[in-house]
Image: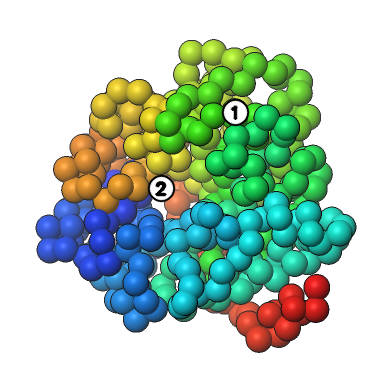
C-alpha cells in the first residue's frame, strides 16, 4: 500500500485541476487532498476533479472535505442536501437517544453523497464540548454541552460515515469548546485547570481514541503549555498520544489560520516538530503549497504506519439512502 511521500494535505485553486498543480502534486506526492466550496460546481465536475487529483499522484489518495451541516458545508443545494447545524438538530431531537439516531442517519446519507463524487473522508465528528463562552463560529457546530452526550453522538456520526464508506476525522483535538475567539483570526488561551480539561474537554476524544484520523486545535492550554498553541506544542501532542490514547493519524488544522504566527514554513516546521503527522494547507495557493511541502518534508516511519492504518480502515459503503431519509423524515 502506498500513502504518499510528503507529510501534507493540500487543496487546489478551483473546480478544475490546473497543469501546474498536477505537476506539483506529482512531484510532492502529498498524503491527500482537501476540497472547499471553490472546488465544487456539480456532481459530474466533482467526480472528474477527485479522479484527477488521484491520477496526479498515481494512487487512491484520500480526498477530504468539511461537510458538517449548517454553515460548514462545502457541498450544497441544489445538487446536495442541506442540513441544519448539528447543535440545532441535537436540541430539537428531544433526547440524546433520538439525537444519536438522527445524527447517525444523516451521517450515513452525507457519506453516500460524498462517496458518489469520490470524497472518502469527512472532517467530522466535531467533539468539542459547547460551553457558555464558546465562540459563535463553533457553538452550533458542536454536538452537546456535556462530554457524555458529545461522545455518544460523535460515535454515532463516525459509525454512520464509515457505514457509507467515508473515513471520519475527529476534531478539534484535544478540545476547542473553551475558545472564546475565532481561531481563523486570533489565538485563544484556555486558563482552566488540567483536571477540568481532563474531565470535560478531553473526555470525548478519549472515548473515541480508536478512530483512524484526527485534527488538532489552534489554541493555548495554559495548564499544559502556556507558550505554544496545541498544534505546535510537544507537550499537548504527547498528552494526545499518552493520556487521551490516540494512536491514529494526526493532522493539523489549517496552517493558514491567523491563530498561528510566523511564515508558513515556520508554522509547518513547528507543527511537524511537535509531533503532528500531517500538515494541512487549505488555500490552494501553489507558491504557499511549495513552501509547506518543503517544510513538512517526507513522512517518517511512524507517520507512514499510521497513514497506512488509516487508509486500511476504508471500506465499501453500504447505505440505503432512501430508507435512511424515510427514517429521518419520521423524526
**Disc 1 to disc 2, how far (Cα)?**
35 Å
User: Image height check: is 242 above or below 252?
Assistant: above
User: Image height check: is 327 above or below 248?
Assistant: below
Whether residue 271 can be seen here: no
The image shows residue 256 at horizontal and vertical percentages of 34, 37
The residue to which callout 2 is attached is 304
Element assignment for label 1:
loop
The image shows residue 200 at horizontal and vertical percentages of 76, 32
Element assignment for label 2:
helix
Left or right, 320 with respect to 118, comes to right
Image quadrant assignment for residue 59: bottom left
Name the quadrant of the N terminus.
Answer: bottom left
Q: By what rule are the colours in the image chosen?
A: rainbow
Q: Residue 54 shows which numbered tag?
A: none
Image quadrant assignment for residue 324: bottom right
The image shows residue 217 at horizontal and vertical percentages of 52, 34
Residue drawn 27% across the image and 51% down it: 284
Label 2, residues with CA under 10 Å away: few <14, some 14-19, many ≥20:
many
The residue to which callout 1 is attached is 180
Residue drawn 72% across the image and 59% down it: 89
Left or right, 18 with respect to 6, comes to left
Amino acid at each position: 500500500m502506498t500513502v504518499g511521500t510528503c507529510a501534507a494535505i493540500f487543496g487546489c485553486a478551483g473546480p478544475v485541476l490546473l497543469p501546474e498543480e498536477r505537476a506539483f502534486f506529482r512531484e510532492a506526492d502529498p498524503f491527500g487532498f482537501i476540497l472547499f466550496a471553490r472546488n465544487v460546481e456539480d456532481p459530474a465536475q466533482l467526480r472528474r476533479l477527485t479522479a484527477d487529483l488521484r491520477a496526479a499522484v498515481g494512487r487512491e489518495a484520500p480526498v477530504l472535505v468539511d461537510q458538517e451541516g449548517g454553515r460548514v458545508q462545502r457541498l450544497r443545494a441544489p445538487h446536495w442536501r442541506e442540513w441544519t447545524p448539528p447543535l440545532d438538530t441535537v436540541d430539537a431531537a428531544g433526547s440524546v437517544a433520538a439525537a444519536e439516531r438522527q445524527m447517525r442517519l444523516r451521517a450515513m446519507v452525507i457519506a453516500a453523497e460524498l462517496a458518489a463524487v469520490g470524497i472518502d473522508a469527512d472532517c467530522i465528528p466535531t467533539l468539542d464540548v459547547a460551553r457558555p463562552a464558546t465562540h459563535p463560529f463553533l457553538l452550533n457546530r458542536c454536538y452537546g454541552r456535556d462530554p457524555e452526550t458529545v461522545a455518544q453522538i460523535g460515535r454515532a456520526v463516525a459509525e454512520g460515515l464509515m457505514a457509507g464508506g467515508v473515513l471520519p476525522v475527529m476534531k478539534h483535538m484535544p478540545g476547542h469548546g473553551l475558545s472564546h475567539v475565532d481561531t481563523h483570526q486570533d489565538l485563544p488561551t484556555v486558563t482552566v485547570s488540567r483536571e477540568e480539561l481532563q474531565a470535560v474537554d478531553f473526555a470525548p476524544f478519549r472515548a473515541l481514541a480508536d478512530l483512524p484520523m484526527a485534527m488538532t486545535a489552534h489554541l493555548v492550554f495554559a495548564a499544559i503549555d502556556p507558550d505554544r498553541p496545541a498544534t505546535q506544542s510537544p507537550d499537548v501532542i504527547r498528552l494526545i498520544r499518552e493520556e487521551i490514547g490516540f494512536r491514529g493519524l494526526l493532522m493539523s488544522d489549517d496552517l493558514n489560520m491567523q491563530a498561528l504566527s510566523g511564515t508558513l514554513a515556520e508554522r509547518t516546521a513547528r507543527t511537524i516538530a511537535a509531533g503532528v503527522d500531517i500538515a494541512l494547507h487549505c488555500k490552494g495557493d501553489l507558491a504557499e503549497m511549495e513552501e509547506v511541502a518543503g517544510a513538512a518534508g517526507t513522512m517518517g516511519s511512524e507517520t507512514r504506519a499510521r497513514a497506512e492504518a488509516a487508509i486500511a480502515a476504508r471500506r465499501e459503503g453500504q447505505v440505503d439512502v432512501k430508507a435512511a431519509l424515510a427514517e429521518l423524515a419520521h423524526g
